[in-house]
Image (cartoon, rainbow, N blue to C red):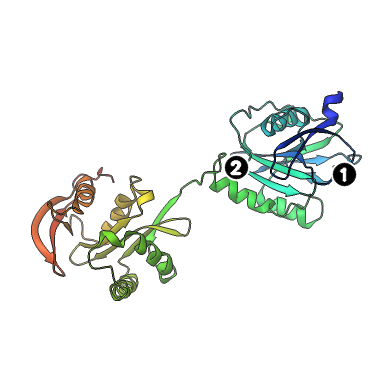
Amino acid sequence: MRKDNQAEQWDLYTKDREKTGKLHRRGDPVPEGSYRLAVHVCIFNSKNELLVQQRQPFKKGWPNMWDVSVGGSAVAGESSAQAAERETWEELGLKLDFSKERPFLTMNFSEGFDDFYIIEQDCDLKKLRLQQEEVQRVRWAGKEEVIKMQAQGIMIPYWFLDRLFEIRDSYDSQGERIHRIQTGFAGLAHLESWLHFAEVVKCSFPGMDTDAAMQDYCDTVISHIKDSSAIYAADARMIVGVLLFAKEEGKICCLAVHPEYRRKRIASKMLELMRTRLAPGQEITVETFREDDPKGEAARKFYTALGFVPGSLKMHEGYPVQEFYCRFRNRGAAD
């Protein structure tokens, strides 16, 4: 911690996190109705291990306890990111650029706001310069080890600490979810999410606009699940793509991808999985909108991009459709 007078002064904020224009001296009680700004930095390495520090036994507040990588208060005139960058340098001797970083989450506490930053940085612990007034030692710790340290009563009991490992693996530094799409053959456990997904895309499928039709569709999905001919794509537990097919005919009965997840090769991946249940070189067919159908432009473009070519004109439950077919000679087709 710096020893100049500025370091002993904190900006005071309203409950809406607006500066009041008043300063507060470190160590004095924070006035009622005013709040200060604190920051914590959680540094993870590429192995998803957290850099933890042990506080000095003479440190005020959680003495001798293990803590996340860095923590401290923003001094007067500092932004949250500037405080995080300074504290990281002072406590660890590690120079990181926080100019483009935003706090991943903010926790309220009785005296103010606590911004938590999640940073990935593989650093050599032997090269760190620890602040002797604050930090005894540092180490890398995985999720199970951190939870064990909390259970032993030697780690500050942040209630969300175990979730940080999941957050770091599922979200980027800007708080955007990292999409990890998985495909597989659906089981009955997927049914509820599948049907929620169907409500999103049913407008693209003629004849699915009534409760009775949706119940028939549900029964069809269950039948395909039991026959191992129902394929899903999911982002975490949320279904974002579905494919129902008939094994003997090599026919796609239903293929759809969530509007927000298109152009990610999800349909291609589901088709690749479908082909593992078909005979080598077996022709795949699908019925979609005719060329003059206003609804057909996107669907026809979609199948054409996958390598399908138009075939015969047909009727499906009284609706004019066209058959498309493909032998997938070009395995590089993508949606």
Q: Residue furthest right?
A: 58
Q: Could you tell me residue 307's position as x and y percent?
A: 19, 47
- Whether tag 2 and tag 1 are in contact, CB under 8 A, the answer is no
State the image coordinates of residue 43 (x, y, percent, origin top left): 66, 38
Rendered view: 219 above or below 16: below
User: SS of the residue at dot 2?
Assistant: loop
Residue 79, given in percent of the width and then of the height, sits at 69, 31
Quadrant where the N terminus sits is top right
Specify which label sits upstream in the sequence, 2 or 1. 2
Seen in the image, is 133 located left or right of residue 162?
Answer: right
Distance from Cα at disc 2 to Cα at disc 1: 28 Å
- Residue toward you, 279 or 175: 175
Helix, strand or loop under label 1: loop
Which marked residue is nearer to the observer: mark 2 or mark 1?
A: 1
Q: Tell me the residue that label 2 is attached to.
A: 47
> Quick one: 13 or 287, which is closer to the camera?
13
Q: Residues within 10 Å of mark 1 (few under 14, many from 20)?
A: some
**Amino acid at the residue labelled 2:** Lys
| Position of residue 174 measured from the top left corner of the image (x, y, whole percent) | 55, 39
Can you see residue 1?
A: no
Residue at x 54%, y 45% (from the top left corner) = 171
Examine the image and state in which quarter residue 277 appears: bottom left
The amino acid type of the residue labelled 1 equals Pro
Going 20% across and 62% down the picture, which residue do you hit? 250
Quarter where residue 134 is shown: top right
The residue sitting at 30% across, 57% down in the picture is 256
Estimate how packed mark 2 is, as few (under 14), some (14 to 19) or many (20 or more) residues with alpha carbons within 10 Å: few
- Residue 77 sits above or below residue 110 on the image: above
The residue to which callout 1 is attached is 63
